[in-house]
Amino acid sequence: MGTPLTPYNSGESKKEQVATMFNNVAGTYDFLNHFFSVGIDKLWRRKLVKLIGKTKPKRILDVATGTADLAIAETKLHPEQIIGIDISEKMLEIGKTKTRHLPNIQLQVGDSENIQFAENTFDAVSVSFGVRNFENVNIGLKEMRRVLKPGGKVFILEFSKPNNWLIQKLYYFYFCNVLPFIGKLVSKDARAYTYLPESVRIFPDGKKFVELLQYAGYKNIECIPLTFGISTIYIAEK
């Protein structure tokens, strides 16, 4: 996929830079996330959780869990255990505060490209708005497949690019102008909210991402566009 886009122009790896970025914006992340999406991100996660629930998973791994919004939503499915991993310690600190009264959620520092669990451990693996931040998407997809039980499924919610030309123009204007301006004012990290639209623009969405899932060994792949294609849910089976 060529040289990966990185948040900062530093000598660190993309993984290290992404961890730094999310540590920098952790305190304002939840507010800005819901503000920029006008709350639609909550509807997207609700849709994702409903689809996960159809598989009746007992053990769920939530990759790039951040402040644990998706992991918390997944408790409605009453699984035995939800484990959330993320490379940002400060995001996890906030997530642990939010989940302190939810005993079936366990949050820990973890690398999506080197998951510290054995093969065939989880019934479902989820990730929301995190795959495009992987340093190596192919390795991350293969790792998630490795820890799935046979027949288990990965559920991925990620930004995508609208096909309608008018929606696309409005989308990019908002993403490339409004979002960075407000993000800079509130988070004090100007680069974090210019990196976001850049990462969405170059991410291989739709059919291209389905091809990546196929290459990683998944089968029975579904691609479900949401809200004019602004985001997409991908479901794939081990």
Image: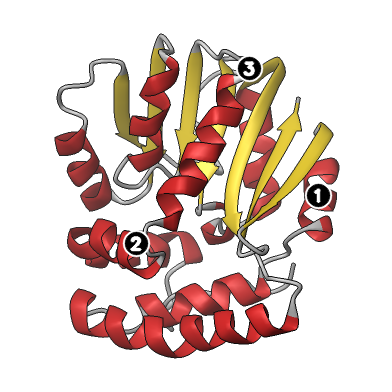
Residue 116 visible in the shown view: no
Q: Locate residue 70 relative to residue 44 in the image: left or right.
A: left
Q: Position of residue 121 (x, y in %)?
A: 56, 15
Q: Residue 33 carries which label?
A: 2
Q: In which quarter of the image is residue 204?
A: bottom right
Q: Position of residue 81 (x, y in %)?
A: 39, 14
Residue at 76 percent of width and 72 percent of height = 163
Is the C-beta separation of discs 1 and 3 under 8 Å?
no
Amino acid type assigned to the residue bearing label 1 in the image? Val
Distance between mark 2 and mark 3 Cα atoms: 28 Å
Residue 113 visible in the shown view: yes
In this picture, is 218 found above or below 58? below
Q: Residues within 10 Å of mark 1 (few under 14, many from 20)?
A: many
Q: Quadrant of the C terminus?
A: top right
Q: Locate residue 114 relative to residue 218 in the image: left or right.
A: left
Amino acid type assigned to the residue bearing label 2 in the image? Asn
Q: Residues within 10 Å of mark 3 (few under 14, many from 20)?
A: some
Q: Residue 210 carries which label?
A: 1
> Of label 1 and label 3, which has the lower sequence position?
3
Q: Residue 55 carries which label?
A: 3
Residue at 41 percent of width and 63 percent of height = 18
Q: In which quarter of the image is the N terminus?
A: bottom right
Residue at 48 percent of width and 27 percent of height = 61
Distance between mark 1 and mark 3 Cα atoms: 20 Å
Amino acid type assigned to the residue bearing label 3 in the image? Thr
For the residue pair 227 and 139, the one nearer the viewer reads as 227
For the residue pair 20 and 153, the one nearer the viewer reads as 153
Which structural element holds mark 1? helix
Which structural element holds mark 2? helix
